[in-house]
Amino acid sequence: MELRHLRSFTVLAEQLNFNRAAELLHLTQPSLTQQIKRLERDVGVVLFERTTRKVELTSAGREFLDRARSILASVDDAVVAAERASRGELGRLAVGFTGTSTYELLPIVTREFRAEAPDVELVLQGEMLTPDLVTALLTRTLDVAFLRPPVTAPDLELRVLRRESLGVLLPERHRLCQQAEIDLSDLAEEQFITHPANVGGAMFSITLKACLDAGFRPKVVQQASETAVIASLVAAGVGVALLPLSVRYIHVTGAVLRPLTPSDTQIELAVAWLRGRPSPVVTRFLKTAERIFEARSAPDRGLRRS
């Protein structure tokens, strides 16, 4: 049974006239007659009563018409759905965010992408460490991830979105809070709260390198995977923490963020996905994310491919 025969049947059923139906279908009358005969053979019943004066649907034809319309409507819907999916307007997308990007980017990117593709099912996961995000991408648990380079995974494509300076998060009653900027060497005797050292994340390595460059090894008294927990520990007076300046998007009472000097230590934020030909939904999401970063760019932020 061919779809074109179903379409011819429904037009003839609505017109009940072979000449008018053939005209609408851009067919000759003999061709339409042959299609209807072929359809009746396929179905195994007579669908039309034909006389020299009129054409009428049989009772079987009336029942078949309802189903035929439903089938054709479903096919049309399927075509529209396929076209929308090819434009990244339908589907499912799982996105992961690391650290402070959870609080800064997740609301912005989600809002913008939902406005562009409201029928895409978004699954969001925040406050993940970069090694966990890499694993989730490689196992296809996530489709896209915002993470901190470096990443050594040849199966991933990486696009660096920006670089940002480090700041120091201090308890609000800390002796250095009155300063507009903090010299990193002034923190040599402080107790530090860091991200875990044993999971291969970027933040601990960057904290350690920055402190060593300033002439001291940090005294780590507490480690936590979640940036919000680190901020809360700082507010509780447990210690200080080096974090990207975007940590300002986490509003924690009792903690104060100050820029560091020198400010040449920077940390990158990148978006990653599986290498190869990304799905239309992933492609659309990446374009949205890149546009957002371009709109929010500042002189110290760049955009490059890696």
Image (tube, rainbow, N blue to C red):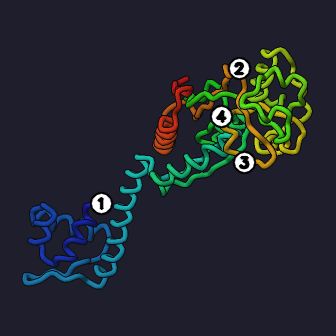
Q: Are marks 3 and 1 in contact (CB under 8 Å)?
A: no
Above-or-below relation of 21 to 131: below
Q: Earlier in the sequence, mark 4 or mark 1?
A: 1
Q: Amino acid at mark 3?
A: His
* Residue denoted by label 3: 251
Q: Give the quarter of the image for residue 28.
A: bottom left
Q: How many marks?
A: 4
10 Å crowding of disc 1: few (<14), some (14-19), many (20+): few
- Taking the spot 17% from the left edge, 65% from the top edge, the residue there is 34
Image x and y of residue 61, in percent: 28, 79
Q: Are marks 2 and 1 in contact (CB under 8 Å)?
A: no
Give the quarter of the figure containing the C terminus.
Answer: top right
Camera-nearest residue between 241 and 272: 241
- Taking the spot 30% from the left edge, 60% from the top edge, the residue there is 2
Above-or-below relation of 131 to 75: above
10 Å crowding of disc 3: few (<14), some (14-19), many (20+): few
Nearer the observer: mark 3 or 4; the answer is 3
The answer to whether residue 266 shows anywhere in this view is yes
* Residue denoted by label 2: 262
Image x and y of residue 198, in percent: 84, 29
Q: Earlier in the sequence, mark 3 or mark 4?
A: 4
Q: Give the quarter of the image for residue 21.
A: bottom left
> Where residue 147 is drawn, which disc sits there?
4
Q: Earlier in the sequence, mark 2 or mark 1?
A: 1
10 Å crowding of disc 2: few (<14), some (14-19), many (20+): some
* Residue denoted by label 1: 2
284 left or right of 65 in image: right
CA separation in Å, label 3 and label 2: 25 Å
Q: Amino acid at mark 2?
A: Pro
CA separation in Å, label 3 and label 4: 21 Å
